[in-house]
Image (cartoon, rainbow, N blue to C red):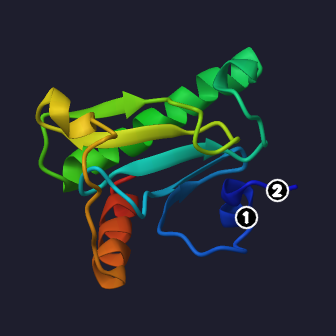
Amino acid sequence: MSTIFTKIIKGEIPSYKIAEDDKFYAFLDINPLAKGHTLVVPKQETNYIFDLEDNLLGELHVFSKKVAKAIEKVVECKRIGVAVIGLEVPHTHIHLVPINNVYDIDFSKPKLEFSSEELTGLALSISSEII
């Protein structure tokens, strides 16, 4: 059975896409910890990040770096925090979260809400900064 992320990649569920290539897909988290919180997933359905082949794991991080650099250009922050939890969806994914302090990446804090228009505009702004 396909994961929710595979359904997003295939366009069966809408998303606020940031970037895509033949192996990876990046999109805004709809329950974000911060403005610009983005998920990066491999198109290959693999439950656990450390089950990815070495080359794919490396490429996932390089792709994530491009996305993180674009987020930094659009969202004011000190850094882009990186988290891999791997329990909530059985499909490898990396959280890229704009942060100014350690609390900003606390997954127990209340999630933010943005309108569809705000998310669409944000996704377009970040996407336009990808090199």
Q: 102 or 73: which is nearer to us?
A: 102
Asked if marks 2 and 1 touch (Cβ < 8 Å), the reply is yes
Q: Nearer the viewer, residue 112 or 128?
A: 112
Quadrant for residue 129, please give it.
Answer: bottom left
Position in image of residue 34 (x %, y %): 24, 52
What's the residue at 28%, 69% (across, down)?
113
Q: Quadrant of residue 86?
A: top right
Tell me: 89 left or right of 28.
Answer: right
Q: Position of residue 48 (x, y in %)?
A: 69, 27
As shown in the figure, which amino acid type bears the numbered disc 2? Ser
* Residue 104 at x, y percent in the picture: 19, 39
Q: Is residue 113 above or below residue 94?
A: below
Apparent side of residue 42 relative to residue 62 in the rendered image (left or right): right
- Category of crowding for the residue at label 2, using alpha-carbon neighbours closer than 10 angstroms: few (below 14), some (14–19), many (at least 20): few
Report which residue position mark 1 lands on.
7
Q: Residue at x 53, y 44 (%)?
A: 40
Q: Which residue is mark 2?
A: 2
Q: Please report whichever mark, 2 or 1, sits nearer to the chain's N-terminal start.
A: 2
Residue at left offset 19%, top offset 53%: 75
- Expressed as whole percent of the image width and height from the top left, the position of residue 12 reads 72, 74
Whether residue 8 is situated above or below residue 116 in the rendered picture: above
Tag 1: Cα neighbours inside 10 Å, few (<14), some, or many (≥20)?
Answer: few
Name the foreground residue: 63 vs 39: 39
Kindly report the distance in space between the C-alpha atoms of the residues bearing marks 2 and 1.
7 Å
Please name the amino acid that badge 1 sits on: Lys
